[in-house]
Image (tube, helix red, strand yellow):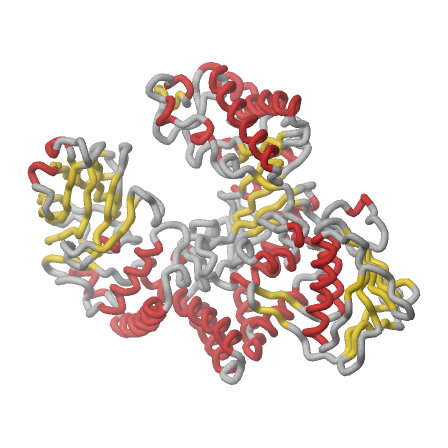
Amino acid sequence: MAVAARGFAEITVAERGQPSAYTLVIPAKASPNERYAAQEFRDWTLKLTGVEIPIRETTPVAAKAIYLNREKPDPALGDEGFDLEAVGGDIRVSGGRRGLLYGVYELLERFGGIAWLDSGFTDIPQTDVFKIPSDLKDRQLPAFDRRVHDWRQISSDISFSARSRINHYYLPERHGRSYPKFDGPLGWGHTFSYLVNPDQYFDEHPEYFSFFKGKRQKHYSQLCLTNPDVFKIVLEKVLARIRHNKTKGNNVKYYGISQNDWNGYCECEKCAAIDAREESHAGALIDFLNRIAEEVEKEHPDVIIQTLSYMYSRKPPKNLKPRRNVMPLLCSIECDFSKPMAENRFEENVAFRADLEKWRKISNRLMIWDYAGNWRSTPCPQHNLRTIWENTRYYRAQGVTELFHEGKVLSKESQTEELAALKAYLASKAMWNPDRPMRPLMERFCNAYYGKGGPFVLEYIDLLERQPVDETKTPIIYSTTIDKMPWTDEFLNEARGLWRKAEAAVADESAAVKSNVFWGVFCADYSLLSKYIHGGEWRPVIVSEKFAASMDRDKFETMRRIARDIVAVLDKYPDQVVVLSSYLNDFRHKALVRALAAAELPGGGDAGGKATVQDGLITYNDFPKSKTIFRERDEGATDGWAIHVHKSEPGWAWTMTFHMHNAVAFDEGVKYRLRVRVRVTPEEGVAPEKAIVTSGLFDRNVREDVLSKSVSAAASKGEWVWVDLGEWTAKNDNYIFHVSSHGCTFKLDLFEITR
C-alpha cells in the first residue's frame, strides 16, 4: 500500500496568475488512457489555479516536465498500481492502464486538495498555488483487485467511477477499461434457470431439476448437479458464451454458474450422498463446478468460473476444494451490519466468519458480496459507516481478492438512502486503502458536501454511533424494518433537530449544498414517521374500538403534519428520486404515508363498523416492476388504481397479513365479514369458464384456509364484481390471498371488512 515521503521543500506545479513552468509529457503514440490522464491533470489544474499546463509528446527545451509513463511501467504495478516520484524538479507518474489515471488523481486529490465527493459534486478548494513535495516517492497498489459498490450513481457516471477508483462497471479505453467483467447472461447472480430453463426442459426431463421434498420441482427449483445431461447442457452453454465473447473481443473473463435465489437444493440419492460426505450443500455444487471448470480450462485457461456461496451453499465443503479457476462469491445476506464483522457477536456473523476462514484456505480466488445496507427501511438510520470501513479492512486481512459492498437503492437517481453519498465515498476509499484513518475523510466530506451544515451532520453521525446497539438482540440486516431497530423516539427527534440546524446553517449556500441537506432532513423526518406507522401506533384501516380509543391524539396530529410534509415531497419528485423502500413494495410505503396525511381520528373507517383496504396497502409477491404483477391506472377501480396480475405459475399473487405490520387494526376473536372487488379476464385461447381466480383467507397457525371462494371470467363477464368470502373470527397472522389459474389475468381493486 501507499508509503509517501514529504520533506520541507516543495515543487510549485502551478501558481495563479503565472505562466506554467511545467509541460505534461506523454509518450509518442500515446494510448487513449495516457492522453486522457494528461487531459485530466491539465483540466483539473486549470480549475484549481487558473493555470493551463500544455501537453506534448516530446520533452520541451528549458522547461520542467510532468512525465506520464516516461518509461514502460514496472510490471509489478499491474493494471491498477502506480508510482509517483519527484526527480530533479521533474514529476513522474507511472502506472498500468488504470493505474496511471489513478496516479494523476492521487496528485490532484492529495496535494491539490480536490475531492470528488459525489456524481456532479466536486469540492475544489480556493488556492493560488498547487505544490508537490520535492522528495515525493510513493508506490500504491489497491487492497482488492475488483472494487465495486452500488451506492448512488457510481455505475452510470463513468468519470466519477474512475475518479473513485471503482473498476467493476463499464469503463472505456480512455479510462483504462474496466476490470475483466462478468458475462451478461452468466453474470454473478442466479443463473441456474438460464442454463437449464425449466419451461424448456422440465416436462420431458424432470430429472434435470432438483428432487426436493419428495419430488422433482419445476417451480422454485435448482438443478440436479449429478445428472450427466445437465452437465453437458451447462458445459455447452458456458463454452458457447466464452466463444461468443472472445469472438466479439469483449472484456469478459468471469462466468457465473450459481443457484437460483431460493432454497430447493437437490436431495436425490447421488446429490445427497455428496452433500452428506462434505457436510454441506456446497458439496454437490463444488463437485459439479470443478468438473465444468476442468473442461473449460482445456480450451480457455484464462477463464474463471464463479459461483455464489449463498444461503444453503455458504458453508464450505469438508474435503472438496474449488479448482484454481473456480471463484466462490461468499454472501453475507444473513449478517448484521450494525457492528463490524470482525467483532460482531450475532450468531449469523459468527458463522459467516467461520465459513470465510475455511473458504479462504481452500480457494485460489475469493470474492465477498457484503450486504452493507438496509433495503426495507431505506431512508432510516443504519449504523453502518464504521462497519463499511472495518469490514473492508477485515476482508483484505482474510485474503479476499474481490469485494462488492451492496447498499442499496434500486434507483440510481434516488436521493433518499440515509447518508448514501457519504457511504459511497467511504466505501470507494476503503476498497483502495483501508489502512488510512476514516474520520478525516468523513469530516472532509461532510464539511464540503453539507457546507456550513457539516458540523451538525457530523454531530448527528456521532449521536448515531453512540446509540446502544446489542446485535444479539436487535440485529440490523438488509431487510430489517425500523420498528425492529433499537432507535427510540428521543433519538430520532434529536436527529431531526440536528438536521434542522444543518438546514438553517446553509440558508445562504449553493443550491447543491441546500439540496444535500434537504434530503438529509427528509430522511430524518421519514425515519420518525416510519417508526410510528410500521410500529403499529396507527393504522389506516381501523375496525377496532379498543385500538381507536388507545391512540395518542397529540402524537397522531404531529405525525400527520410530518406525513403531509412527506407527501408534498412525493408529489414534487418522481418515484425513482424518492425511494422509501428498495426491498419490495415501495408503492405501499408511500400509500401508507398518504393515508396518514389524509386520515382523521380514529383513522380510515368507522371503528365500530365497516372499512375498506385499497390495493396500495397490500403486499404482492413480486418486485414492483414485475411483468406479471404490477400496479396500474384503471378507470373502473374505486380510487383509479388496481393491481394487475398475470401469473403463469402456481402461488399466491398477493397477500395481506393481519398483524402489526399491515393496514388493519382489528379485535382478535371478533367476527368480521370479508369482501373483495376483482375483475377476471381470460387470455386469448382460454375458455372464460377456465379463467378462474380464487380469493381466500389462510390461517398460518393451523395452515389451512379459513375462507375461500372462486370466480371465473364466465361468471363475472369480464366486469368488476364483488366476491363475498363470508365471515370469520379474526386472528393475528391470518393471510388474505389470491391464486389464479393458468391463462387468467385479473385485477384487484380493494377489500371491504365489516365488523
**Quarter holding residue 209:** top left
Q: Is residue 536 left or right of residue 382?
A: left
- Relative to 626, say whether 25 is above or below: below
- Please state the horizontal and vertical placement of residue 47, each as a whole percent of the image: 68, 74
Q: Which is more toward the observer, 537 or 450?
A: 450
The reply to whether residue 337 is in sight is: no
**Quarter holding residue 481:** bottom left
- Relative to 282, say whether 624 is above or below: below
Q: Is residue 22 left or right of residue 164?
A: right
- Please state the horizontal and vertical placement of residue 682, each as a whole percent of the image: 16, 37
Q: Residue at x 29, y 71 (%)?
A: 560
Q: Which is more toward the observer, 355 or 683?
A: 683
- Relative to 137, say whether 16 is above or below: below
Q: Residue at x 58, y 23 (%)?
A: 292
Q: Residue at x 19, y 35 (%)?
A: 684
- Please state the horizontal and vertical placement of residue 180, each as a whole percent of the image: 63, 41
**Quarter holding residue 215:** top left
The reply to whether residue 713 is in sight is: yes
- Please state the horizontal and vertical placement of residue 709, each as a whole percent of the image: 12, 37
Q: How many numbered marks, from 0 up?
A: 0
Q: Residue furthest bottom?
A: 508
Q: Residue at x 48, y 63 (%)?
A: 418
Q: Which is more toward the observer, 33 or 485?
A: 33
- Relative to 350, say whether 303 is above or below: above
Q: Which is more toward the observer, 122 or 260?
A: 122
